[in-house]
Amino acid sequence: MNRMTPAHTDTALAFPAGSGETLLDLNEVGHTYRTRDGGGVEAIRSVTEQVRKGEFISILGPSGCGKSTLLMMIAGLLPTTRGAITLGGDPVLGPDPDSGIVLQDAVLFPWRTISRNIQLPGEIAGMPAAQRQARADELLSLVKLDGFGGAYPRELSGGMQQRAAIARSLMLSPSLLLMDEPFGALDAMTRDEMNVELKRICLEAGATVILVTHSISEAVFLSDRVMVLGNRPSTVREVVSIDAPRERGSEFVTTPAFGAYVGQLRALIGAEGEHA
């Protein structure tokens, strides 16, 4: 795979300044869905990539190319039918508490307060109540929901519910945060605001993030690198490094560099099924 920027193409992958060792290793990973007649539908043919600690990686590609399938394999929620995945040097063979996941729907329990929703992974893991509460309070502050810990999901806006879902995913301090279209159901203005907040949250938490998105502009705004998948059965068509400061405000979207990256990715993916 080549590293590409609007200015040049190079054969070496570049990682963000200060990034550490490899956290996630995908080695010729593939998945074939079995059909009722005994046949198979090959969704992903082969993906080989390494993700360093602290990186923010977005996955883009045409609709139906297997973006979510790849994320579910990384999460251990779907087995690989080819290749291997390791997280922190250990094989991913099933759900791992070292991975947090955020979906398009916040999936908060309506009968639990926001604080108790956030604490749920800690309860399951057997974390002492006082420690759970302290961690939940810390996360409420991180996602700017101070004062809402005692509220119920129905009392929060969609964007606030997604902040709570992000906080819940960070409860056990996972080394990897996986996100599948987390803001897809939000209106455009709220989504833009949430992207700024997500960038801040991830930098403050020191999280390693893999985001599946259909939005080219979202991927450029948030990412250190963007992985572009080809049509099904997919392989990695290209990895584009976003050469911009990691701390980005909304003004970044008005820069020529932002427009150049969006144009480059649009050309790689093709207009069909994608939007910026």
Image (cartoon, rainbow, N blue to C red):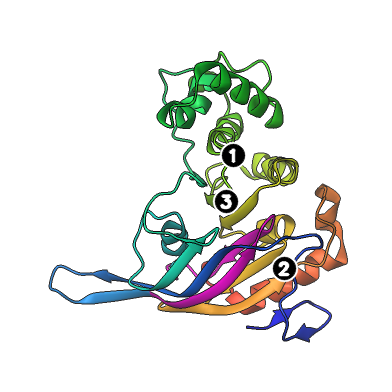
* Residue type, numbered disc 2: Val
Give the CA separation, mark 3 to mark 2: 26 Å
Tell me residue 146's x, y (percent): 69, 20
Q: Does residue 148 belong to the magenta stretch?
A: no
Residue that extends furthest to the left in the rendered view of this protein: 37
Q: Quadrant location of residue 65?
A: bottom left
Q: Residue at x 66, y 48 (%)?
A: 207
Q: Which mark is residue 173?
A: 1
Q: Main secondary structure of the magenta part?
A: strand
Q: Residue at x 56, y 16 (%)?
A: 130
Can residue 4 be seen here? The reply is: yes
Judging by the rendered image, the residue that carries numbered circle 2 is: 262
Q: Quadrant of the C terminus?
A: bottom right
Residue at position x 64%, y 53% from top?
208
Mark 3 and mark 2 lie on one chain; the one further toward the N terminus is 3
Kind of element beneath mark 2: helix
Q: Position of residue 191 (x, y in %)?
A: 65, 44
Tell me residue 59's x, y (percent): 57, 64
Mark 2 residue crowding within 10 angstroms, few (<14) / some (14–19) / many (20+): many
Nearest the viewer among 76 and 31 is: 76
The residue range painted magenta reads 44-65
Dot label at residue 176: 3
Residue 273, compared with residue 267, is above or below; it is: above
Instruction: Tell me the kind of residue under disc 1.
Output: Ser
Q: Is there a contact, CB below 8 Å, between mark 3 and mark 1?
A: no
- Report how far apart the C-alphas of labels 2 and 1 lie in the structure: 32 Å
Q: Quadrant of the N terminus?
A: bottom right
Using a 10 Å C-alpha cutoff, classify the residue at mark 3 as few (fewer than 14 neighbours), some (14 to 19) or many (20 or more).
many
Quadrant of res 274: bottom right
From the top left corner, tell me how far across and down residue 72 is, in percent: 42, 57
Instruction: Kindly state the secondary structure of the residue where label 1 is placed.
Output: loop
